[in-house]
Amino acid sequence: MRVRFTLTADDQLDRLPRRLQTRIVEKLQFYSTQPDPFQFAEPLPGSSEYRFRNGDYRVIFEVMHDTMWVLAIKRRDEAYR
C-alpha cells in the first residue's frame, strides 16, 4: 500500500520537530507494509476515516484505491475538534 499526504497533512508534518517527523513517517511505512494495516487503526465514528496513535499525535487517514491518504497530523488534544 502506498502512503500519500494531502497538502494540509504535509504542511502539518513539516511544522513538527525533525525527530517527530521521522517517527511518524517510519510508523506509517511500517503500517503500510502490513497485510492488514487497519489492525493498528481505529475508525472515526460517522466517517470513512481512521486514525493511528503516535505518542501525543494522531494521524488521521483514509484508504482509497490501495493508497493510504494521510489527511491530518495533530496533537491529541486538537485532533477531534
Image (tube, grey):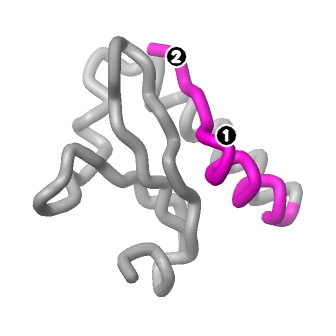
Which residue is rendered at x = 53% and y = 56% of the image? 72
Label 2 environment density (alpha carbons within 10 Å; few <14, some 14–19, many ≥20): few
The label shown at residue 61 is none
Which residue is rendered at x = 68% and y = 44% of the image? 7
Q: Residue under label 2, please give it.
A: 2
Q: Quadrant of the C terminus?
A: bottom left
The label shown at residue 25 is 1
Question: Please, what is the three-letter code of the amino acid marked with disc 1?
Answer: Val
Quarter location, residue 44: bottom left
Which residue is rendered at x = 85% and y = 64% of the image? 17
Q: Nearer the viewer, residue 33 or 76?
A: 76
Q: Quadrant of the N terminus?
A: top left
Q: Nearer the viewer, mark 1 or mark 2?
A: 2
Residue 79: x and y in percent read 45, 74
Which is more N-terminal, label 2 or label 1? Answer: 2
- Measured along the vertical axis of the image, is residue 31 above or below residue 43? above
Q: Decide if residue 8 is on the left or right side of residue 69.
A: right
Question: Please, what is the three-letter code of the amino acid marked with disc 2?
Answer: Arg
Which region of the structure is painted magenta? Answer: 1-17
- Measured along the vertical axis of the image, is residue 53 above or below residue 61? below
- Measured along the vertical axis of the image, is residue 71 above or below residue 57? above
